[in-house]
Structure formats: C-alpha cells, structure tokens
Amino acid sequence: MKILLVNPFQIHLVNKKGRIYNRTWTPLDLANCGAILEREGIDVAILDANAEQYGPDEVAKRAIGYDKVFITSTSLDRWQCPFLDINPFLETVKALKGVVSEVYVAGSHGTVRPVEMLEVTGARAIIRGEPELTVLDLCNNSKLSEICGITYQAGKEVLSNPDQTPVNLNELPIPAFHLLPMEKYNYEIMGNHFCLFEMTRGCASKCGFCLLKPYGSGVRRKYIDRLIPEIEYAINKFGVRKAYFMDLEFTFLRNQVMDLCEYLIKTNYKFQWCCQTRFDLVDEELLHQMKKAGCRLIHFGVEAGSDRMLEIINKGITMKDIREGMKKVKTVGINTACFFMIGFQESEWRDMEDIIKFAKEISPDYPVFHIVAPYPGTVLYERVKENGEVNFSDNSLFPEAIVGNFTLDELRKITRKAYFQYYFRPSYILSRLAKGQFDILQNQCKLFWSFVKS
C-alpha cells in the first residue's frame, strides 16, 4: 500500500480573505503522520505543495499510483487560525479525486464543519481533530465504521463516529523531516534553515475567540528527553539553525522550558528560536535563560487596547500585566511580535484608537493587526449567532468578519490605518535600520506591502 500526505499550495503570500499570511512552514502534523506510518512499515510520502508551489494539476500528477491520499486544509501551524479562503484547498482535492479513489481530508475546517466539508469535498471521510492516530487507523482498517474521529457518507446517511483518543506526544516518533523539502522552510523575521517543533499541545486559557477544537482538551506535554532527539536530528541532519516552538503557551510549563534552555546552553549549537506565550507567563529569570539559550523572538497575543475589551473577550490578562510583561522582555533584550484584533462585536471607534495608541506605547518590534475572524467552533462565533444587532460579513462556511457596528470595508481601512501609523513612524524605521539584518528587513517589507495592497 502506498500512502501520500499532502499540504496544498495556498497561492498568495497574503490571502485576500482575512488577510492571513501564508508562510512556508514545516507541516509538522504531516511529518508526525509520516513517521508513524513508516514505523508501521507502510510506504508513505509527503508532498508539501505549499513549499514546492505546486498547483492542483501538478499535485494530482504526482499522486498517480498512490492507494490513499490524505490532504490537510490546515497544517499544525494553522490549526488555531485557519485560512478563510478554502478554494485553493478545494481545487486540489478535486484534482486528486480525479486520479486517486480514496481521498481523506484533515484539518481545522473539517473538525468544526465535518458534514459541510464532506459535502463540498466529496472525500471518503473527514478526519476531525488531531490526524496522527486516525490516519494510521485508516491505513490499517478499511471499515470506516470501526474508526474513531471521522465523519463519512454511508449510503444516504452521514455518520460521525466517536472522537479519537488524544495523542500521547511522548509516543510519537521523531517527525519524518526526511520526507520534507527542509531547505525551503523559512520565517521572514527569523531567516532560513527553519523548522517547527512542538513541546506541548493545547491551551490552558479560555479566550472566547480562539479556535482550540483541533487540539482536544487540556494541555499535553512532550518530555524533554523526547524533544531533544528531534532538535538534534533537525540540526545535525538538515542544518536547521532557526526554529519556532509551536506551542500555544510555550512558558506555561516553566520548569520544562528551563530544562530545555539548560540543554541548549550546554550544547552551544548555533541555534536561534522563537515561541509564543502570554505576558503573565514570563519572568526575568526565565527570560534571561531563554535568551541565553538562543531565544530571539516571542509572540504575544495582546488583542485589545483597554481593560474593558480584554475583559469582554475573556483574555484573562490586564493592561498592567501586558505593560509589566513587555518591560521584562525589553529589559532582557528579546524581540517581540504582538497581535492585535480589530472588530469584536462590542468594539466602538474608541476601541480601535485605543489599539493603535497602546501598540505605540508598548512598542513591539513587529505588531500585527488582524480583523477578528469568527471561527466556527468558538465561543465568539456562537455569541455572534445569538446577537441580533451584529452579523457575519458573508454567508460562507468560514466568514471573514463580524459586521454591524462597522462594515467590512471600514474594518479593512482601520487595519490599514493601524499598519501605516505604526510602521511609518520615523522612530520605528530608524530603530529597525539600527538593528541591521537587512535581509530580514527586506522580507518584512515585502510581506508588509503584500498585506496593505491586498
């Protein structure tokens, strides 16, 4: 049996719907699936069409001869923030179905809209949630009725089997990086020779706008003695020198992060990395150790510019927490990327101005301003459905924005205004030039221009 795992090409650097960046990052979930199948003696290949920039026809051509194809609408780095324009994915599925009899669909979209995604894709089954165990089951068992975590068509009836058992991260083999074009992955802020790693899966916070359904419940950890061989394999075998630990709250397990840093300091690899966490989950001792171990950038979700809005969206953090956390990070000297969300249903004009004002105050190195996407499967989505005064911007399966207080066009203009007012300040431009790294600055400018013109 020959198995193909596919990550489809997203076409645009910035997707027009939702202004979502399409970065060329390691499809870590597919690498996990590939490693599991190889361990079981199954012939498997991964086609990262996004990295290779292969369109639907080329993907279909390369899929000829395979018995089963698994295609994801969102690789792991997009589980939380999936693409809203699924047409490139759908076109690839359509092309694959012309050459392969068994096509299975995984990803966030099918997790929250399994019945609808089954209908629009015509797939043999939709994989809900984490794909690793379900993909293996589908390769070992032809009876769909016996496989957990899938939704499928049985005659005229659509059936959804019970959820799959959560993945034990410590039982996963080293990801099958050798099946990927490792030389093609990069992060415009960090550079090339780039890879993703995962130390925990899930999130302890309860933010109403976050799509957490693909991760399952709670937070699961991968122990350091399981993670270290992955890092060493990527560094020694593929020359990886930059990485992103793709945890939703990397420093939630503080002691484990300290242990990881101790290992990285001791080995003294020429290895730089970034992560994502919350401002109330960092302290100066931890940050000093992280920087010493190679941490050069931390992503933080700020989201709003006032305590009023932070409380409404259930962020679980205050303006004071953010200010104090940012002060600690700046004192240590680690760069920051902060995310701000524009267009919650309760937002007023002053809230938009507060966001821009607060961004300038805390002065992150890389602020990102997003229109709020009401993802199905979130508390936010359900609240919009129940509110008669606001609505979704479109009637698609995955709407772009919330409209009522503001139109979609107004939200786009506000977002552009935030970018221009922040990035075109002379003080900001001079600060970036003073730091050098002109190749990274050039990549950042390209990405910025792609966003504002979209």
Image: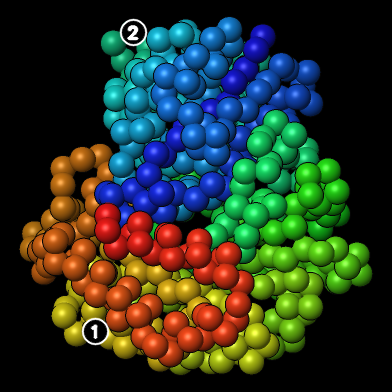
- The foreground one among 125 and 178 is 178
Q: How many marks?
A: 2
Q: How is the image coloured?
A: rainbow
The quadrant the N terminus occupies is: top right
Mark 1 crowdedness (10 Å alpha carbons): few <14, some 14-19, many ≥20: some
Q: Image point 49% across, 22% down: which residue?
A: 59
Q: Are marks 2 and 1 in contact (CB under 8 Å)?
A: no
Residue 163 is labelled as none
Query: Which quadrant of the structure image shows residue 260?
Result: bottom right
Q: Which mark sits nearer the N-terminus, 2 or 1? A: 2
Q: Amino acid at mark 1?
A: Glu
36 on left or right of 48: right
Residue sitting at x 62%, y 63%:
190
The foreground one among 281 and 231 is 231
CA neighbours of label 2 inside 10 A, class few (<14), some (14 to 19), many (20+): few
Q: Which residue is mark 1?
A: 353
In the rendered structure, find residue 155 and report the number of the disc placed on it: 2
Query: Residue 109 at x, y = what percent?
Result: 38, 39
Please indicate whether residue 162 sits to the left or right of residue 46 in the image: left
Q: Is residue 365 above or below residue 152?
A: below
Any part of residue 292 in sight: yes
Q: Secondary structure at mark 1?
A: helix
